[in-house]
Image: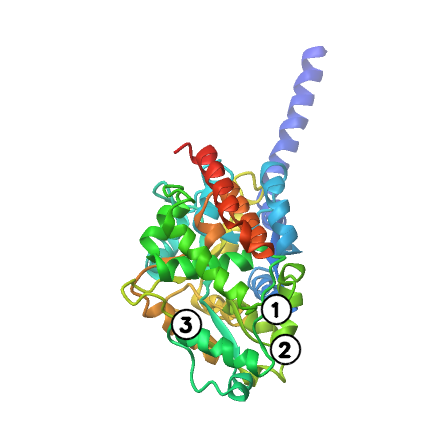
């Protein structure tokens, strides 16, 4: 009796398993895709809008994938990212190439994307940005856009001040500053509350005075901050501060608050990346143009900042299959061009069409003709802890340039501690 009951139960269970197995393919097909989560850093409504458009395109192409996108202001994003990666990360996030990427790759927090590069033909399409996407021989980034840095300026204000042409040399730039001040116009709008905007000034002065080879050694912690070549960068910068070429109280403004000085005609120039063009008001845009940071020493090969933006899959992501699908979708020439236009940047995809926007065209020419190398940017080429201390030192310097020697001595102590050199 017991044996028969056992056999009956076994037969029923076996039948149930057979039915489940027969239904399994159907169940898998109807519930194949999970939820794809992503965190996107943005600055300004136009940047958010273009990312939303790309995500909408992906949803149309993959209606079976449920996408949950969170948009976070860039400055808050930088603070929150380490916590996400080490706890419960999204499946996809955007970040930066160079040391910024390597910082997380060496800690095992980013997924190795080398297979995606081979499978999707990225070696060819993204040849120029492969090096900055690579750490320890493997690729951990999917490049999206990169952008030029230079001096934006108001053509009408230059004309009003009697400046006949864009300055090509440092002396010509200083002459332009004098003419602008004589016309009651501040030469430069600077949003120093965002310390990275000051880092752009340091980068360009160092690249023009000392060149990219020296700059990269400094970024790698191999040069003392008390080196006379480093001090020369700051003393050249001090000339601008002493001459009142920056807006008053520049440290009290972030980038968004500093731009209206340009839009309202109170300041004539701003050193910034081309990503800000998407936010130019329609009535101001026709008066805006852009030129290469002037030459300081003609014997130094001209180098530029050309930071690369990128997408990443966190190592602890839950839905990596759909994350790889999303990266393959975005890394096409068409989506690269769309992102570049919306972000005021250049597509990192070499197969994307050349930009139509006049300022983007200038940026494209600047980067294409660079002979002295392309840097990622101060806080992207350098270890995060040192970059944070360096930018804090820049804010202290702008607040009181007379404390330069003390600031450099403190930075040198920090360098020795971090790099043990």
| Label 2 residue SS | loop
The label number, if any, that marks residue 247 in the structure image:
1
- The numbered mark at residue 324 is none
Hey, which quadrant is residue 71 in on the image?
A: bottom right
Q: Are marks 1 and 2 in contact (CB under 8 Å)?
A: yes
Q: Quarter of the image containing the C terminus?
A: top left
In this view, the residue in front, 190 or 110, is 190
Neighbourhood count class around disc 2 (C-alpha, 10 Å): few under 14, some 14–19, many 20 upward: some
Residue 100, x across and y down, in percent: 48, 47
Q: CA separation, marks 1 and 3?
A: 21 Å
Residue wearing tag 2: 266
In this orientation, does residue 394 appear?
Answer: yes
Mark positioned earlier in the residue sequence (1 or 2): 1
Mark 3 is surrounded, within 10 Å at the Cα level, by few (under 14), some (14 to 19) or many (20 or more) other residues, namely: many
User: Which residue is denoted by mark 3 in the rendering?
Assistant: 292
Dots 3 and 2: beta carbons under 8 Å? no
In the rendered view, tell whether residue 339 sits above or below residue 66: below
Real-space Cα separation, disc 1 to disc 2, in angstroms: 9 Å
The residues tagged by marks 3 and 2 sit, at their Cα atoms, a distance apart of: 22 Å
């Amino acid at each position: 009796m017991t044996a028969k009951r056992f056999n009956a139960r076994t037969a029923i269970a076996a039948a149930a398993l057979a039915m489940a197995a027969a239904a399994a393919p159907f169940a898998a097909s109807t519930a194949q895709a999970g939820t794809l989560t992503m965190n996107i850093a943005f600055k300004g409504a136009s940047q958010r809008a273009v990312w939303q458009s790309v995500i909408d395109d992906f949803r149309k192409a993959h209606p079976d994938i449920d996408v949950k996108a969170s948009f976070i202001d860039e400055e808050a994003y930088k603070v929150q990212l380490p916590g996400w990666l080490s706890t419960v990360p999204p499946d996809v996030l955007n970040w930066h190439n160079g040391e910024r990427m390597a910082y997380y790759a060496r800690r095992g927090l980013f997924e190795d994307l080398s297979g995606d590069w081979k499978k999707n033909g990225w070696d060819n399409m993204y040849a120029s940005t492969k090096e900055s996407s690579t750490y320890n021989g493997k690729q951990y980034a999917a490049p999206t856009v990169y952008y030029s840095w230079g001096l934006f300026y108001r053509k009408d204000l230059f004309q009003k001040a009697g400046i006949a042409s864009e300055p090509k040399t440092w002396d010509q730039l200083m002459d332009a500053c004098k003419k602008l001040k004589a016309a009651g116009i501040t030469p430069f709008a600077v949003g120093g509350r965002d310390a990275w905007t000051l880092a752009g000034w340091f980068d360009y002065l160092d690249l023009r005075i000392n060149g990219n080879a020296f700059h990269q050694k400094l970024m790698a912690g191999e040069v003392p901050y008390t080196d006379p070549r480093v001090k020369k960068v700051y003393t050249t910068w001090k000339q601008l501060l002493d001459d009142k070429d920056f807006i008053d109280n520049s440290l009290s403004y972030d980038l968004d608050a500093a731009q209206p000085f340009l839009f309202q005609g109170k300041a004539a120039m701003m050193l910034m990346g081309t990503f800000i063009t998407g936010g130019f008001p329609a009535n101001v845009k026709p008066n805006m143009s852009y030129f290469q940071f002037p030459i300081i020493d003609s014997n130094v090969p001209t180098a530029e900042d050309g930071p690369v933006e990128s997408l990443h899959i966190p190592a602890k992501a839950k839905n990596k299959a759909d994350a790889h699908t999303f990266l393959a979708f975005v890394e096409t020439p068409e989506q690269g061009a769309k992102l570049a236009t919306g972000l005021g940047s250049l597509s990192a995809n070499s197969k994307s069409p050349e930009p139509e926007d006049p300022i983007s065209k200038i940026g494209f020419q600047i980067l294409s003709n660079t002979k002295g190398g392309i840097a990622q940017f101060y806080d992207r080429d350098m270890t995060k802890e040192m970059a944070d201390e360096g930018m804090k030192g820049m804010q202290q310097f702008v607040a009181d340039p007379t404390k330069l020697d003390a600031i450099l001595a403190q930075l040198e102590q920090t360098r020795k501690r971090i790099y043990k050199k």
